[in-house]
Image: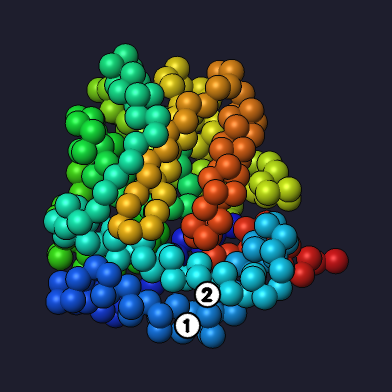
Amino acid sequence: MSQWDGKSKGTLLGYKIFVFCIKKLGIKAAYSVLVFVAFYYFLFQRKSNQATYYYFRQRHKYSVVKSLLWVYKSYFTFGQTIIDKTAISAGLRNKFTYEFDGVELLQKLLAEKKGGVLISAHVGNFEIAEHFFGEIDLECQINLVTTDREHSVIKEYLESVTKKSSIKFIVVKDDLSHIFEINNALANNELICFTGDRYFEGTKSMSETLLGQSANFPAGPFLIASRLKVPVVFVYVMKEPNLHYHLYARMAEVKQRDEQGLLKAYTSSVESMLKKYPLQWFNYFDFWNVLTPKNK
């Protein structure tokens, strides 16, 4: 199945080890632990290995050897983003440097006082975006639309050792009451953020091509965003070498009420990020729905 099961990689013990290493040894020393953690995943996570190998081998057309090596490097890079997120949330933001690309779009969006929609993906490290906004003096409330299916124990632990996030969460509900929360937030000139690359079984999906192969995407973000009379911006926070991060913001140039056009613009935007940062694709499942045998 190409839909996500609602669970992200990582265990409570793993996060505790990262936090201990960050506090006692420092960020870069904590990275050294990833050599073993990434190797564990490389050896034992068969399904995510298959999905990630397919991504490198078939979608990027890398060689067999490079694809296998980069499966390991993908786990290592993902672990680095977890360590970075934890470190920044724990007050070590000054250890990192930041670069802004397209921030004027966000400044203009907020100046219009109509609110706006941000759409991101599970690439890079978007969860630290609020810290970027603080660096560029964007006084805005971010509302992340979520299904709340993450590991609650891990979330509770991270909240106990890091600063409380200023991001508000709008939980998707069966009665659609989240639509009213979204409209209220926009009326207050707040930003609504969706991730547009994961859907759940039983929810409506749309298909579009990504890296040369058709895939399914959640319909909700694109249906909602295409009908709201506010600007839509694609936003990513990508990891660079030497504790450096790069924020990208790109305006979606599509007609209103054209959800398929918005999805196409989105996949084109995500594709441009993946071509520049191929290791920062963190969808460790059968995204293109090609690895699971089809029922005859």
- Amino acid type shown at disc 2: Tyr
Q: Which residue is mark 1?
A: 39
Q: Depth check: 201 or 218 in front? A: 218
The quadrant in which residue 172 appears is top left
Q: CA distance from mark 1 to mark 2?
A: 7 Å
Number of residues whose C-alpha sits closer than 10 Å to that of mark 1, classed few (under 14), some (14–19) or many (20 or more): some
The quadrant in which residue 163 appears is bottom left
Element class at badge 2: helix
Q: Position of residue 186 (x, y in %)?
A: 32, 24
Disc tally is 2
Q: Are marks 1 and 2 in contact (CB under 8 Å)?
A: yes
Q: Residue furthest front?
A: 242
Does residue 232 appear to the left or right of 152 in the view shown?
right
Q: Depth check: 20 or 275 in front? A: 275
Does residue 29 appear to the left or right of 261 in the view shown?
left
Question: Residue at 26% across / 49% down in the picture?
Answer: 97
The quadrant in which residue 66 appears is bottom right
Number of residues whose C-alpha sits closer than 10 Å to that of mark 2, classed few (under 14), some (14–19) or many (20 or more): many
Question: Residue at 27% across / 74% down in the picture?
Answer: 30
163 in relation to 141, above or below:
below
63 in relation to 279, above or below:
below
What label sits on residue 72 in the rendered view?
A: 2
Does residue 48 appear to the left or right of 171 in the view shown?
right
- Amino acid type shown at disc 1: Phe
